[in-house]
Image (cartoon, helix red, strand yellow):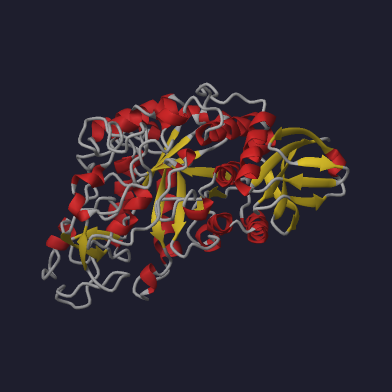
């Protein structure tokens, strides 16, 4: 019975929406469209040359698809060369991993994005380097080296490095190879000078003073005030990040800097001390994944006090470090559609993780194959352009070494989790995302409106989005049963724009695991 109710709710929601299933790709400038981020784990996104690694040329070939989804901003995982499959620890900060392409490919990507009115944000993890980096090779046991103070050592002879967060410098990584990670000395003035110049090169690759050919911002991975809570590098938000970001803004005042708060908190200190523009809405993520209406209401209220002028947060239900939303008990048509609504309609700036719009699953592996970083591969599997997970252009790079990765793919041929299978199906999740994205673009209050909590009881949450005279209300039912919410001013609800909830007098009744949007009368 529950499955039948969910199916009926989904069908009613689709029937209630007058929007086309596949809006044409937008052609207006990004500033004229509501911001929508798309977080890409590049190695897994799209392979252009048959080596199974996602690459920059594959991303360029995908821009029509992303623009049709309403995406305005690409958030891209690190590009620099690295012994680690995820590229978060650099062998060398300069250059591009050759499996991704080269600087010509990067510049072609930026040019195509900017021509479309889209932006690119590049992920950075500058707090650590691998044992292949020149700073380690030239400083270890070499206290008189010009780069002797670039890494943290426990002794004056530079023989014993400071251990990382995991208590060691030595790791076995995918596919079962040995590697080291060392902590960068962010307190060293030369290091800050180096990274300031380095980030400016991404902002202005041809170094002509015009940042139009470079990235539009950075995501700072694992950002902390006291790095690794070790008491060694402290006061980093105001002492390292804020002054460096001020220098970057002198080159491009519009540069966006996004903190990935290492504590997964609300991000207040990162605004106030680190002077970032944007944080991740971790409290909303936690509540959404728990399907907890009370916690979601509290997170929205807290966001309303924290996120003011000049500040923003990315609202998401999954990313490269989390279990996929469509995993386990949440893997039903109604809950997957609810995840789309929670991401796109709650407020602030929504961020999709690649494949979320298809309902890709994934949780940490329990059989990692001996490597410290292998358990996260299921969260980062190949985007499904076609049904067969191993067929081109799907980027199933992890299948090149089956002995090092024994976890099955989260999806299998014929399960419907691919662009090819969902593209023309109006009821498919991909087209629900397209529909909601188009609804955001059409309704000013959903595009840029403030968010407030109107009422919350049990599994029901009613919020209001307001932009000037434009107002909408959204009723979320995060529970598995139909529920009714009395709302004294329910007669002010006008057109139902999306969803299947109904109004009887002052009562709103919502199907299980649903979202419904109404326009409000003035």
Q: Position of residue 203 (x, y in %)?
A: 36, 40
- Picture quadrant of residue 242: bottom left
Residue 468 visible in rendering: no
Q: Is residue 10 left or right of residue 316?
A: right
Query: Residue placed at 63% from the left, 57% from the top?
Result: 296
Query: Residue placed at 49% from the left, 27% from the top?
Result: 68
Q: Quadrant of the C terminus?
A: top right
Q: Position of residue 360 (x, y in %)?
A: 43, 44
Residue 358 visible in rendering: yes
- Picture quadrant of residue 514: top right
Q: Residue furthest front?
A: 1
Q: Please determine whether, in this image, residue 186 is positioned above or below residue 204.
A: below
Relative depth, front residue between 98 and 494: 494
Q: Please determine whether, in this image, residue 449 is positioned above or below residue 130.
A: above
Q: How many marks?
A: 0
Q: Is residue 150 left or right of residue 503?
A: left
Q: Position of residue 343 (x, y in %)?
A: 56, 45
Q: Please determine whether, in this image, residue 298 is positioned above or below residue 158.
A: above
Relative depth, front residue between 511 and 118: 511
């Amino acid at each position: 019975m529950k499955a039948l109710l969910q199916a009926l709710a989904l069908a009613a929601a689709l029937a209630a929406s007058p929007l086309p299933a596949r809006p044409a790709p937008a052609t207006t400038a990004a500033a004229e469209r509501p911001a929508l981020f798309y977080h890409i784990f590049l190695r897994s996104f799209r392979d252009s040359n048959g080596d199974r690694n996602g690459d920059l040329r594959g991303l360029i070939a995908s821009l029509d698809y992303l623009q049709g989804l309403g995406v305005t901003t690409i958030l891209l995982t690190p590009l620099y060369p690295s012994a680690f499959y995820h590229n978060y620890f650099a062998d060398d900060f300069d250059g591009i991993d050759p499996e991704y392409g080269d600087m010509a490919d990067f510049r072609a990507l930026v040019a195509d994005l900017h021509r479309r009115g889209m932006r690119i944000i590049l992920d950075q993890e500058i707090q650590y380097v691998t044992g292949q980096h020149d700073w380690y090779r030239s400083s270890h046991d070499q206290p008189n080296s010009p780069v002797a103070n670039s890494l943290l050592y426990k002794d004056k002879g530079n023989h014993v490095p400071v251990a990382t967060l995991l208590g060691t410098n030595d790791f076995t990584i995918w596919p079962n190879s040995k590697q080291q990670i060392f902590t960068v000395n962010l307190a060293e003035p030369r290091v800050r000078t180096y990274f300031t110049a380095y980030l400016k090169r991404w902002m202005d690759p041809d170094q002509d003073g015009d940042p139009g050919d470079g990235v539009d911002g950075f995501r700072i991975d694992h950002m902390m005030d006291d790095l690794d809570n070790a008491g060694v590098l402290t006061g980093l938000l105001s002492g390292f990040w804020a002054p460096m970001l001020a220098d970057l803004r002198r080159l491009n005042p519009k540069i966006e800097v996004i903190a990935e708060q290492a504590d997964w908190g609300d991000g207040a200190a990162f605004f106030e001390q680190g002077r970032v523009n944007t944080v991740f809405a971790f409290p909303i993520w936690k509540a959404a994944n728990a399907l907890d209406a009370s916690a979601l209401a509290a997170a929205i209220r807290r966001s309303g006090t924290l996120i003011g002028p000049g500040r923003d947060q990315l609202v998401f239900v999954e990313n490269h470090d989390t279990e996929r939303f469509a995993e386990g008990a949440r893997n039903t048509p109604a809950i997957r559609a609810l995840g789309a609504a929670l991401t796109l309609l709650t407020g602030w700036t929504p961020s999709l993780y690649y494949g979320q719009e298809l309902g890709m699953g994934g949780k940490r592996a329990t059989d990692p194959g001996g490597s410290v970083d292998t358990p996260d591969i299921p969260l980062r599997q190949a985007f499904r352009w076609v049904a067969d997970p191993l067929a081109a252009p799907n980027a199933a790079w992890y299948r090149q070494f089956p002995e090092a990765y024994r976890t099955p793919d989260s999806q299998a041929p014929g399960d419907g989790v691919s662009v090819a299978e969902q593209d023309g199906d109006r009821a498919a999740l991909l087209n629900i995302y397209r529909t909601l994205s188009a609804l955001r673009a059409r309704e000013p209050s959903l595009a840029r409106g403030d968010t407030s909590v109107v009422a919350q009881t049990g599994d029901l949450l009613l919020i209001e989005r307001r932009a000037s005279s434009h107002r909408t209300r959204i009723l979320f039912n995060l529970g598995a049963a139909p529920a009714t919410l009395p709302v004294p001013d329910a007669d002010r609800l006008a057109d139902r724009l999306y969803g299947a909830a109904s109004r009887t007098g002052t009562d709103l009744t919502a199907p299980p695991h649903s979202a419904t949007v109404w326009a409000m009368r003035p």
